[in-house]
Image (cartoon, grey):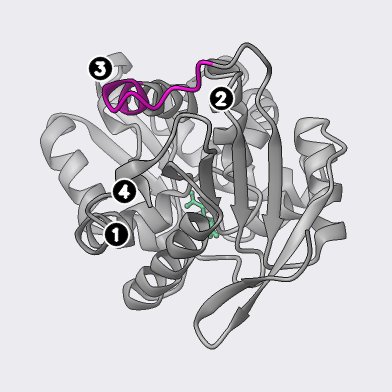
Amino acid sequence: MSGNSSPTQPIALYDSGVGGLSVLRAVRSALPREHLLYFGDQAKVPYGSRSLEELRSLAEASARFLLSQCAKLIVIACNTASAAALKHLRAVLPEVPFVGMEPAVKPAAEQTHTRKVGVLATPSTFQGELYASVVERFAQDVEIFQSTCPGLVSQIEKARLAAPKTRRILEEAVLPMLDAGADTLVLGCTHYPFVIPLIEKIAAGRARVIDPAPAVARQTARVLAERGLLNPGPDEGSLRFITSGEPAAFEYALSRLLGLNSKAEAAHWQGGELELISR
Ligand code: DGL
């Protein structure tokens, strides 16, 4: 598909659920003329504790589905799927431009004064080679504290951004890091930027928080420009949303997280492949 893609085709973004909307927000603001197609695999959320093998096959089927919907580039707007499947996707779909996420350990290592950094991510992301390699390459002299924030993805899926339970999960993750001297927090899961206001309240000025989404949007722009695929149109691009879960639940989260009152379409898993149900 993408070998002869045209600039007017959409950029696709893919996540386990609504987390990648934090990346969509940044892509929209960097590239307002681009048509964006978002797929949240809410039938399978959370991805964070699934095996690498399963994540690879979910990501490959999702990418093939997004290509069938005319994507010209796919942003894997999910750290977990990027860690597990990005290499595989580039090998099986070599003609497709992919942009992936990696925990922002490099900018954190550059910015920390205490040389202590906290990373919040899912278990699969921490276990993957990608995380080990960014730590090894960029943070050899930095002490890293890790937390998987159990239950946080599910709170954000329900758009419970300031609920007492959400606060408790974050306090348990972040306070020990701050008490140990971390002055920089890396959000290694695309769901987490939606709770930056709460993290900042908890941190009370003791740490800065790094959201990688703007850097991913810049990388998306670079890759499109290199391939001559930036949409030159004068108008604002369209937005299209698809979920493998309940459209009503997706629409509710979309309105709470981004203030957008758009409709979502449904796609269902059928024998390992995604099928669009409605348009
Ligand atoms: N938003 C995802 C990430 O960036 C996945 C969260 C999950 O489904 O566990 O890792």
Going from N to C along the chain, the mark reached first, 2 or 1, is 2
Between disc 4 and disc 2, the foreground one is: 4
Between disc 2 and disc 3, the foreground one is: 2
**Helix, strand, or loop for circle 1?**
helix
C-alpha distance separating marks 2 and 1? 23 Å
Magenta stretch: give its range.
222-232
Q: Amino acid at mark 4?
A: Val
Residue that carries the numbered disc 1 in the rendered image:
89
The answer to whether residue 162 is seen in the rendering is: no
From the top left corner, tell me how far across and down residue 6 is, in percent.
43, 35
Residue that carries the numbered disc 4 in the rendered image:
96
**In-image side of 81 versus 70 (left or right):** left
C-alpha distance separating marks 3 and 4? 32 Å
Q: Is the residue 128 above or below the residue 70 in the image?
A: below
Q: Are marks 2 and 3 in contact (CB under 8 Å)?
A: no
Check disc 1: other Cα within 10 Å, few if <14, some if 14-19, many if 20+.
Answer: many
Q: Amino acid at mark 3?
A: Glu
Q: Which mark is residue 110?
A: 3
Between disc 2 and disc 1, the foreground one is: 1
C-alpha distance separating marks 2 and 3? 22 Å
Going from N to C along the chain, the mark reached first, 3 or 4, is 4
Tell me the residue at 56%/55% (across/down): 69
